Image: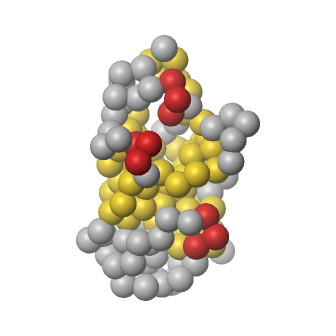
Amino acid sequence: QVQLVESGGGWVQAGNSITLSCAVSGFSTSRAMGWFRQAPGKEREFAAVISRNGGHTTYADWTEGRFIISRDDAKKTIALQMNNLKPDDTGTYYCAASGLVLPETIFTRRNEFGSWGQGIQVTVSS
């Protein structure tokens, strides 16, 4: 059974950092992994992705170089380090695994991810 479980969210003041973690289980092979954000009243949008073997990463423009995605396949975890947070970063963050298994391929569209976590809230206060 595939499971993606996010942790590490919470409340943080603007300008500070927080790191989200996603524990992954149930896959027979590794996949590209991504993070998405859903702000209040808005659609879920792409934030960051790391390729299957970790060699490539891509970020949404709105992250402005403040986020770092990483993976530890030995521990089966994906992390999203978020620095210099802004109130606009507030939202529910979702971990997702790509539906296809392709070497070093980057996916950024929601429909390219077949498995999702339950989401975790991040609130940034000004």
Taking the image as shown, residue 18 lies to the left or right of residue 98, namely left
Q: Position of residue 98 (x, y in %)?
A: 53, 73
Q: Residue furthest left?
A: 55
Residue sitting at x 34%, y 28%: 84
Q: Residue furthest front?
A: 61
Residue sitting at x 33%, y 57%: 70
Residue sitting at x 53%, y 54%: 46
In the depicted view, which residue is nearer to us: 58 or 19? 58
Q: Position of residue 36 (x, y in %)?
A: 55, 52
Q: Residue furthest top?
A: 126
64 lies above or below 44: above
Q: Position of residue 49 (x, y in %)?
A: 42, 61
Taking the image as shown, residue 9 lies to the left or right of residue 60, namely right
Residue sitting at x 30%, y 43%: 65
Q: Position of residue 48 (x, y in %)?
A: 43, 55
Q: Count up the numbered dots.
A: 0
70 lies above or below 80: below
Q: How is the image coloured?
A: secondary structure
In the depicted view, which residue is nearer to us: 14 or 8? 14
Taking the image as shown, residue 98 lies to the left or right of residue 52, namely right
Is residue 93 shown to the viewer in this render?
yes
98 lies above or below 93: below
Is residue 25 shown to the viewer in this render?
no
Locate the N terminus by quadrant: bottom right
Where is residue 50, by image quadrant? bottom left
